[in-house]
Image (cartoon, grey):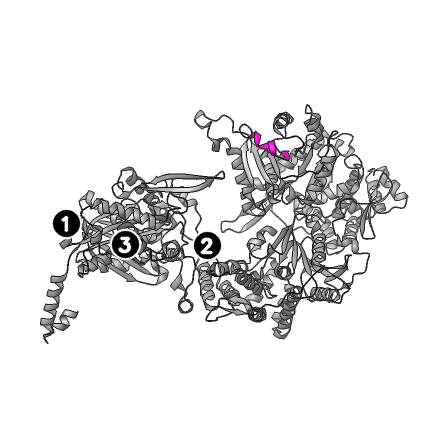
Amino acid sequence: MLPVLILNTGKAETNVFIFLKILKENKMDAYIVAGFRSAVGKAKKGGFKNYRSDDLAVDVVKHLMSTVPEVDPKLIDDMIVGCANPEGEQGLQIGRLISARALGFEVPGMTVNRYCASGLETISIASAKINAGMGHIYIAGGTENMSTIPMTGYKLAPSYNAAMDYINYHVGMGSTAEAVATKYNITREAADEFSYNSHLKAAAAIDGGKFTDQIVPVTVKEVFVKDNKRVESEHTVAVDEGVRRDTSIEGLARLRPVFKNKGTVTAGNSSQTSDGAAFVMVMSEEMVNKLNLKPIARLISCAVGGLDPLYMGMGPCVAIPKAVKQAGIKLNDIEQIELNEAFAVQALGVIENAGLNPDIVNVNGGAIALGHPLGCTGAKLSVQLFNEMRLRNQKYGMVTACVGGGQGIAGIYELLN
Amino acid sequence: MKHYINKVAVLGSGVMGSGIACQLANIGMEVVMLDIVPFNLPDEQKNIPAVRNSIVNGALKTALKTKPAPLYDKNFASRISTGNFDDDFELISDADWIIEVVIERLDIKKTIFEKVEKFRKKGSFVTSNTSSIPINMLVEGRSAEFQENFCGTHFFNPPRYMELLEVIPHTGSSDDILDFFMEFGDKHLGKRTVLCKDTPAFIANRIGVMSVTKLYELTDKFEFGIEEVDALTGPLIARPKTATFKLQDLVGLDTGDKVSQFVLSAVKDDVFFEKYRGKDNPKWLQHLLDNKWLGRKSKAGFYKLERTPDGKKNFKAFNLKTLQYEDAIKPKLPSVGDTRKIELLDKRLQALINHDSKGGKFIKEYFAELLAYTSNRVPEIADHLYSIDDAMRTGYAWDYGPFEYWDFIGIQKGIEIAIEYDLKVADWVTEMASSGADVFYKIEDGIKKYYDLESKSYKEIPGLDTYIILDNYRHKKPVIQNSECAVHDIDDGVLCVEFRSKSNAIGEGIGQGIAGAIDLAEKGDYRGVVIGNNAKNFTVGANLMNIGMIAMQKDFDTLEKMVDGFQQLTMRCRYSNVPVVAATQGYVFGGGCEITMHCDASKLAAESYIGLVEVGVGLLPGGGGTKEMAVRASDSFFPGDVQMPTLIEHFKPVATASVATSAHEAYGYNLMQRDKDQVVANAKRNIYEAKREVLNLADNYQKPISRNDITVLGRAGLATLYTAINEFKLGNYMSDYDVEISRKVAWVMCGGDLTSPQKVSEQYLLDIEREAFLSLLGNQKTLDRIQYMLMNNKPLRN
């Protein structure tokens, strides 16, 4: 707004004209030029259970850099790391730690937390900063290791005043899913069927090699004691671990509800807890041209919205219309959607109430099968979306997720050829 | 030579094998359990270890899921390792004890023992859990050294819960092994060990089969329904509620029949069983067996639980005449109605036997046969009559064995009723009676003695020197006595407060007893106090009836005095100049748990079921229990601690009224503490151990200083606990009133709504605990819960 004040002509119409002109002249388009992710490990039992999220992020970022040799790390303005539980092993400002280790002391880094939206939010911030002319190259994404850090953090310390005003400010995620199931009449059968299909689609995607190009194989070296001897071991994780190939509707139906007596939500129709990291490089148009790079996509809008925390799962319904409007397109211009499957009931509620076409949602399966490494998820889904859209030669795609505390996020990408 | 058992090999992993392995793990043994490799494995699976061990691993997994749990603590499962007979037999080579629990087939067992002989180390003990094969036959072909170290060790199902361990020598068993297992089984395994002879079915099953056979016969003779027989043969005659037919459902009709057929075929010179030999089963029993209605495991047996479409329970009973299931009835027998209210068992049994009705005659004929039969089994199956009583009490959960019943009925009366049915009691009994000895047991100078056949005199029951049985002090006038308790001088300067109210519920009398005992000790007359009793349950908690009545009259002054009094009592247990030690077994609920928590130490029988259960009746622990959990949470905080998880861990057992299903589990609930509370394997020994603890502590006992350094978290803690409670509410696991009660618990444990964590005194916490307790008593919903509990013996969720 500063330029407007300086050039105040005294006439409102002229002011607006000058403001828009300045904005347009100064706005720089932001492009995604590369994006990668780790495979998603099963929390507490998978390949990354003993691998810190900063280590994993460093591996992914280094690989990302190696695919864009034109970029000297010193050119990078900032690194923005999404993380939903930035404490304990993920504390001590993990964003900075990752930037220093992966890119060198000269590259700064920060941590962003909007729970499950963090990984998308970082791309949004990077794009917005470039749009505002604050920089040219950003590394954005997210990382999360749910194997080590408890879901509620090490110290669950809600606000007394908040709790006295409205107890559901701090409601647990499972309870929100049950609340959504009740309010929107979503049945156990529908939830289980949705979950079953998520596994089927994910298995097909893995078998079809859909994810191979986007996954950075990560080698984990471990030292442990076996039969009283120090032993070293090594394994490489290159495939998403969450898919259960033996899942059946009957098997899912046998699981007990975990959050509510005679409830709907089971371990089988909820997202899995996971470990993973995903990052993209966001670059200004000027720099793209200067380095002569071929961009992949552009985040044309990203919106967040809020609602009663008890119905957290319906958050995308608030965010999607905003994002669509901002992008200046229509909902049915969108050809593909990655909707984070926090819970099957929530995903079904969103599809129904946001008016999404179920056929274009999560064509390669979702978090129920592939896992949900909280702070990483938004970036991971973006990377998945780019690849699939490229294969299908599509133009507009969306990543959307519900967010703890009663929020939703939706980001719309335009794919560039 | 002194033997030590640290590693045990269990061969066979069926229901008994797995159960025995678990009980051995319970007492801290390293256990290796082996079973066969599955037959006919396809080639591609032949070499996969997981497949080769699938039988033993599957059996253990099933056992671990069984209810009631076979382990004191599920973490103890890590003490059991598994393997198979083909690949892992060398694992027995360093075992100190090898127990065989494979299928009841002599050839298979002999093959196993042949292999055991090849692998075992010299001097290790080898035993068999056989229930039917003569021990002598099992050792045929084995070396002399093997034979010396071999005997039978017969557990009852489930091995954790059934107290009997029958020890059976063969002719070559060394005294060493028999002495060892008689003592080890008692002190380490927590069992009543009974020395048997190598006779068919040993002791408990022999008498048990006779008993059920007779009851079946009488059922037909008197044309009773099964509900009527169960009404006559349960608690009325001091037996478990499962009585006759419900017990068969529990055991499994096929299992029961197998044991019966075995006894029938194997016994010699047994006039009772001669009558049945070659005869068919009662037609109703055969009908059930033929239809595979075998009891609870097949969801139908003598009884059947059906559910109506709307989920209500519909209890059916098998009609022995029509051979159909019909709605179960509540029998109204005059014999039961006229006698069940008689408090004293001797008077009740006498009234029953003399009752001129079908029911009275049924019971009379049953006891006539039982007494006559058992008398003729001495010395055939046991040299000493107490062995038979011990076996029936602990193996069949009868409150009394046959000779104890006989003492209740009267020796002459017992002989008379036997004659009435043309039954011959053993000569030694008639001789004993005519010599003027008119009881089988008597207590002299606090020692229980039995009538010894050989010497024709009363002798001390061996192995009881480290049991303190309060019954044996009855001849001495208690130091203090009131309607709820008695305080005994249990020698060496130690007092024992014995609860003896109904269900040992705690009221004013018990309070006076404990306070009085501590006063006496403080005066210098005694060195310290044990709080313990020999009842099945230590106590069910405070006397709810009393509290409920006063609360309904809204007499809050009296209620406040009562709660205050109870708080002072528990604080007196902690803050006195003499050691106070609790000895518990069975239920240790509510107020009983609070007393135990405040004692200087406690000796908990492994089978102690401990919990602060007040929330279930709409209250919170008001005798210092809630305060104490706050103290324990505070004591667990350490510099840099985030504290909340610790607070939650201490809050949960109170807010959810959790009951630890063993003394070991109570540590995990923070209800008991490892540094002061210890587990005793044998429930019969806890008072003795508590007395020893009093004497240990008394030497340099220092009264603790009252606490004013308890960190409570105030609002920070409340927000966390309220949030956690909300999750239970949203999940429909708590009603609105549950939420209200839990929030009160949270309030007390956080010290109220203090704006920051701070240190407070014990008295402050007691004050807010009392206030919270009284406020709940002012709520009609709490009164409804109390009333419901008193009437239905289960909690109301309102």
Is residue B537 located in the magenta-colored stretch of the structure? Answer: no
In the image, the segment drawn in magenta is: B87-101
Spatial CA span between label 3 and label 1: 23 Å
Image height of B142 relative to B503, above or below: above
* B61 left or right, relative to B170: left
Image location of residue B37, percent across then percent down: 52, 29
Image location of residue A205, percent across then percent down: 28, 40
Image location of residue B790, percent across then percent down: 62, 61
Tell me which amino acid carries mark 3. Answer: Phe
- Residue lying farthest bottom? A10
Tell me which amino acid carries mark 1. Answer: Leu
- The quarter of the picture where residue B454 lies is top right
Q: Nearer the viewer, residue B497 or B145?
A: B145
Label 2: few (<14), some (14–19) or many (≥20) C-alpha neighbours in 10 Å? some
Chain ID, mark 3: A
Q: Nearer the N terminus, badge 2 or badge 1?
A: 2
**Residue receiving disc 1:** A291
* B338 left or right, relative to A288: right
**Residue receiving disc 2:** A261
Do tag 3 and tag 1 residues touch (Cβ < 8 Å)?
Answer: no
- Residue lying farthest top? B141
**Same chain check for tags 3 and 2:** yes
- The circle drawn on residue A77 is none
Label 3: few (<14), some (14–19) or many (≥20) C-alpha neighbours in 10 Å? few
Spatial CA span between label 3 and label 2: 52 Å
Chain ID, mark 2: A
**Residue receiving disc 3:** A105
* Mark 1, secondary structure of its residue: helix
